[in-house]
Amino acid sequence: MTSKTQNQYLHDGTVNFVSWNIKGLNHELKRKKVLSHLTGLNAKIVFLQETHLLSKDQFRLQKDWAGQMFHSSFTKKTRGVGILIHRTVSLLLKSLCPTHSPHRWRLNPLLLVDENCTEFISKQISFFLETNTSSEVSAGILWETLKAFLRGQIISYLSHRNKLETKKVSELKSKITRIDEEHARLPSEALHRKRQALHSELNLLTTKEIEQLIYKSRHHYYEHGENANKLLAQQIHKQEVRNAIPVITNMNRDKIIDHKNIMHTFRDYYKSLYSTEFKEDNTQCNVFLDTLQLPQTDTFSVEELGKPLVLSELLDAIKSLQGGKAAGPDCYSAEFYKKFSTQLAPLLLAIFTEARDNKILPQTFRQALITIFLKQNKDLLQCASYRPISLLNNDVKIFSKIIARRMEKMLPSVISQDQSGFIKVRHLSSNLRHLFNVIYSPTKSNTPEILLSLDAEKAFDMIEWKYLFTTLEKFGFRQNICAWIKLLYTIQKFQFNMVPDKDAPCHHCYLQSPLNHWQLMLMINGIIREGLEQKISLYADDMVLYISYPQNSVPAVLTALTEFQKISGLRINLNKSVLFPVNSQFKYLGVNITSKRKALYQRNFAVCMEKVKQDLHRWSTLHLTLAGRFNVVKMNILPKLLFLFENIPIYINKSFFKQLDSTITSFIWNSKHPRIQRATLQRPKAEGGMALPNFQFYYWAANLLINISEWEWKVAMQRLHSSSICTKHTIIQLKIIYRVHLSRLKLSKMFPGQDPTCEHCNQVPASLGHMFWACAKLTSF
């Protein structure tokens, strides 16, 4: 270590650091020698380990040259760390850790299982409503005031209860101490019984404190950690997400490291993102939509949608709220609404009715907290790399759920069959099998064909509200229906989590917008298969266009998208959009699409098998019981494979399932010899098994679930005997059915006592041939 004089330090600014494990400074002579040696080294900042000094003895390190001194506060001599700083050095420590925001009150979920507390809250709700309900006070103001009133009453109740419990505990402890002293001087059975009674009373008072400590210590990990629930999922999940954000880049490309400024940078980013660019004039949107032939809602559905809300709808919506979720800005959880639903539901109904008449919801209905999570494999410095999650109040969730339940009944009749996302009785597999039909069906023409996958940039956030309202009117929705929907699309305000600033206005969509894709269909030439023209497939905002003659169609598509953006606000992220020739391989909706059907197995099932092996090897180090390992297989392995079984209709050899069963057996028994046969483990729990999934049975069930339209069935049947290549996913299913179908006749032979008669005609045994070709009830289809 280099020694420098005081003059050298003052001129060149060099600071000498010394770190020294001195193994004790209690001896006066050793202490003087150490401090003198440090003076000779011209040390400016000294780090001392194992000083073995008590907190009261730290003054012994004080020296004339030391301007600042810090020492750990321990009461044992076996440890101790000290820091000495020279008086010529000015030391300023600034923490890079996030500063805590002002405390946000949250309703303790344990209060809702306390009978005394729930009774108190119920009485306060009744008292408030009886006292303040009148025709002169609007329901919205009454609701806002009720939430503030309850918040104050709950805080007051808890404070008073805690004071009484603390006082009572202190008195009991004092009485027990006095009895112990008396019992020590003069033992007696009466004193012993009295002490036991006091101790039992003390235990009852401290039970609630212990429950709170158990809740905070996540005791559920011990009791429920291996059940098939969220706790086990968190254990096996790969911990890759970084919660802390140490640095971010703002709009001027400057790096921000201060926590408060980082949060302000995010706030400004989302404020800009959610701002509207739509012009007040709606003429262009009307002209554009008038050129399209949009389907119209039927009269009955329109009348049902426009009916006034009823109390039963509201109560059903409250019951359907998912528990265990973070609450919004008002901090009232879903469990609170469920607990007091009978008292709160009439007031909420009055609020929604009043809001429809006034065309605006109460203020807290239009507030949200935004919390963020880093997207996978994204740049940590960019705000766009983080996924925003809006935490809404549960009262607005209840209202949204009621409207969504009404809408979902009639959406299938309005939204095209090309859109399968978030529509009842439509599935993701339809898009994939639609794609398989195009790729694996031979064409006699030499027409160039491509697939264009379009990525909508934050589709649910960028859709303009006026375009949405105009589109609803063009679909035939009446004003009374649109009035309900418009309540959710008034100017909202968001508050960025951990930033105690004022709310910022935003332009944000809560519900899925009915994206209008007919204009793209009018602009492109589709790919013709079996006399039908395939143009577009959508799953929510994931869009795939089937294009022939790309030299003419692609420019027309880009022009249409540009025009569509001007009226709707929907932006296409061309950096993420991909163009695929039909004979290439790509990934769509989580499935690797290949140019050859036979390659589907290698690109999907084989890859999934390797991933399963890696995951099971990683999870084998977790301290799980046998039951916990079964639940890991059910929660993580089964959904992955079931997704492939349902969406990729190909034949899989038994070797795949043998390899899969072998891998899972090795994981379950921790690479040891199995003690129970796999067939026994696969039995239901009621029959003495562990309900271990039989993956081959799941594969059969997934492929026996035929979900195709009538024209696809007819085309498949026509080509069944004339084609050696699977041109329709229906053909693939039929081949699988021939191999694995368990008819009623076959089941009756396997399990005596089963009825072999056809369930449709009830005339002859239901053999495979009868079910597909001879049954009179089925041949008519």
Image (cartoon, helix red, strand yellow):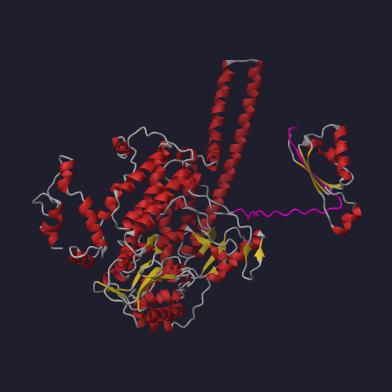
Q: Residue at x 57, y 49 (%)?
A: 155
Residue at the image point whose x is 39% and y is 50% from the top: 609
Quadrant of the image occupied by residue 468: bottom left
Where does residue 283 sit, x and y in percent of width and height? 42, 84
The reply, left or right, for residue 259 in relation to residue 544 is right
Would residue 502 be seen by someone viewing this image from the given angle? no
Taken as a whole, is the magenta stretch helix, strand or loop? loop
Which residue is more in the foreground, 614 or 539? 614
In the foreground, 126 or 116: 116
Image quadrant occupied by the C terminus? bottom left
Residue 183: % across, % down? 63, 18
Instruction: Count all numbered tags in the image, as a single digit.
Output: 0
Along the line of sight, the residue nearer the viewer: 580 or 307: 580
Residue at 22%, 52% in the rendered image: 739
Please determine whether, in this image, residue 742 is positioned above or below residue 483: above
Vertical order, 565 against 26 (above or below): below
First to last magenta residue range: 77-103
Residue 148 pos. (x, y %) = 54, 56
Looking at the image, which residue sits at the far left?
Answer: 763
On the image, the x and y values in percent for residue 89 come to 84, 53
From the viewer's perspective, is 493 left or right of 97?
Answer: left
Is residue 448 shown in magenta? no
Write the residue at 42% across / 41% down: 227
